[in-house]
Image (spheres, rainbow, N blue to C red):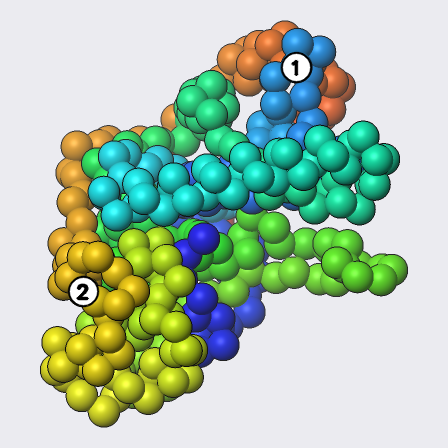
Amino acid sequence: MGVSLKELITKEEIELKDLSGKVLAFDAFNMLYQFLTTIRAVDGSPLTDSKGHVTSHLIGLFSRLVRFLEAGIKPIFVFDGEAPDLKKKERERRKKLKLDAEAKYKVALQEKDVDSMKKFASRSSKLTEEMVNDAKELIAAFGIPIVQAPSEGEAQAAYMVEKGEAFACVSQDYDSLLFGCNLLIHNLSIAGKRKKIHGLGYKTVKPELIRSSEVFNKLGIDRDKLIVLSMCIGTDFNVGGIKGVGPKGALKKVKETDDWDALFKELKWDDFFPYPWEEVFYLFKKLPHTDDYVLEWSRLNKDKIKTLLVENHDFAIDRVESSLEKLKKSEDKKKQKSLGDFM
């Protein structure tokens, strides 16, 4: 879900080519959920193979990996580890919502209400251990490094950007800014033409670069105040925030004081949450990360890719081979250009 900071954030539209040669740390779960939610059949159900295994995430992932590598991007995929206790509570809440959506989807299915089927099917998306393992296998087959975070993937990615091992974090959520990421990229996995939600036609979606320094300068705050602001309106660790406080109101409040204890007493934090505000604040400041990973990019393994997608999940072999051939031609062209530059 993440924190709702959209109306306060300064963004810069960029092109895919602007990221050529850049190492980017992807929030893997965030991306896979996007694919599960958006890549669906007409009735809203996820796409599956002949054995009933969901393939929506693999379809999206395969397509994007080819596109990223063609563009010269060097991806790193960071996977979530153990969730903090407060996040586990949020997951339980989401689980209940998904079960409710599943029940409503079944009713819509019986009534042949296609619009409701689409709506409730997307809300019931679940990322299973099997899906995660398949995604990791495909990423590894492309020769792309995988990093297992000890806790939140966004916190690990932010740490890697801070160390200079990656240029930017990639996620649709704004939480990366709270974890200290100074460069965040939105829309990278959905960039391109997309159908409009209402009405006919398409809209163009471009990647967006968010610089934390520009956000802080525009708003007149620092990272600590952004964390407190976010806590006022709600995060994954205190869902719903404080009733009656929106982004602009929260911004005004945090600019008026540095006494967070007094601020949260004024806003009656204890009426909304059975744990102290400090617990949430320091999760964003002190969430664990690791140095136990190796960042090495290797040649893609066509046989493994075809085994996973074609043999295991019924992908059309022509589509897979044509995409891989297109990627090979792109890489060969880059090598020839590089050699020409050297000569």
Q: Is residue 247 above or below residue 183?
A: below
Q: Quadrant of residue 231?
A: bottom left
- The total of numbered circles placed on residues is 2
Q: Position of residue 210 (x, y in %)?
A: 42, 68
Q: Indicate which disc residue 52 carries.
A: 1
Q: Residue at x 18, y 49 (%)?
A: 287
Q: Residue at x 26, y 68 (%)?
A: 271
In the rendered structure, which amino acid carries the disc numbered 1?
Gly
Dot 2 corresponds to which residue? 277
Q: Indicate which disc residue 247 carries.
A: none
Query: Depth-wise, is mark 1 or mark 2 nearer the camera?
Result: 2
Secondary structure found at label 2: helix
Residue 298 appears left or right of 191:
left
Q: Are marks 1 and 2 in contact (CB under 8 Å)?
A: no
Residue 239 shows up from this direction: yes
In the rendered structure, which amino acid carries the disc numbered 2?
Trp
**Neighbours of disc 1 within 10 Å: few (<14), some (14-19), many (20+):** few
Q: Is residue 68 above or below residue 222?
A: above
Residue 191 appears left or right of 266:
right
Q: Is residue 212 above or below residue 32?
A: below
Q: Earlier in the sequence, mark 1 or mark 2?
A: 1
Choose between 39 and 116: the one closer to the eye.
116
Q: Quadrant of residue 182?
A: bottom left
Residue 75 shows up from this direction: no
Cα separation between marks 1 and 2: 45 Å
Q: Residue at x 69, y 36 (%)?
A: 105
Q: Residue at x 31, y 58 (%)?
A: 238
Choose between 35 and 37: the one closer to the eye.
37
Choose between 138 and 294: the one closer to the eye.
138
Q: Quadrant of residue 232?
A: bottom left
Secondary structure found at label 1: loop
